[in-house]
Amino acid sequence: MTNREIEKISQRVAELVITELLYHADTFIVPTKQSNEEELLAELAATMTKLDFELKRENYEKCKELQDKIKIIENKLNKFK
């Protein structure tokens, strides 16, 4: 293969790759750093889910710990208001 043929093939491959990337661009998820508030909201949701699970198991000691944790998270979230 000559350099000209290699260049032509590489250009065509690049065009195909770019076309496919643009075609599927709406499905890409760009990771972003979560803000502290978003992290706290995620932690609050997870803790509330755990609380619900422990309530169903009637594990009241663990529920008390989770309620205390929820209050701490809520206090931190109130600082964002």
Image: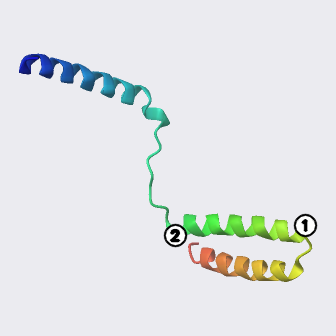
Q: How many marks?
A: 2
User: Quarter-wise, where is residue 43 in the image?
Assistant: bottom right
Q: Is residue 5 above or below residue 33?
A: above
Q: Is residue 10 above or below residue 48?
A: above
Q: Amino acid at mark 1?
A: Lys
- Extreme residue in the front direction: 1
Q: Within the image, what quadrant is residue 13 found in?
A: top left
Lateral position of residue 17 relative to residue 64, left or right: left
Q: Secondary structure at mark 2?
A: helix
In the image, residue 77 lies at what x, y percent?
61, 74
Of residue 29 and residue 62, the one placed in the foreground of this image is: 62
Q: Position of residue 9 (x, y in %)?
A: 20, 19
**Residue sitting at 7 percent across and 17 percent down?**
2
Q: Is residue 25 left or right of residue 72?
A: left
Q: Residue at x 31, y 28 (%)?
A: 18
Residue lying furthest left in this view? 3
Circle 2 Cα neighbour tier, 10 Å, few/some/many (<14 / 14–19 / ≥20): few
The label shown at residue 37 is none
Specify the quadrant that holds the N terminus.
top left
User: What residue did someone put label 2 on?
Assistant: 36
**Quadrant housing the C terminus:** bottom right
Tag 1 or tag 2, which sits nearer the N-term? 2
Q: Which structural element holds mark 1?
A: helix
Name which residue lies at 83% across and 66% down: 52
Q: Residues within 10 Å of mark 1 (few under 14, many from 20)?
A: few
Q: Which residue is labeled 1 in the image? A: 56
2 vs 1, front mark = 1
Residue 74: % across, % down: 67, 76
- Could you tell me residue 31's position as x and y percent? 45, 52
Q: Amino acid at mark 2?
A: Asn
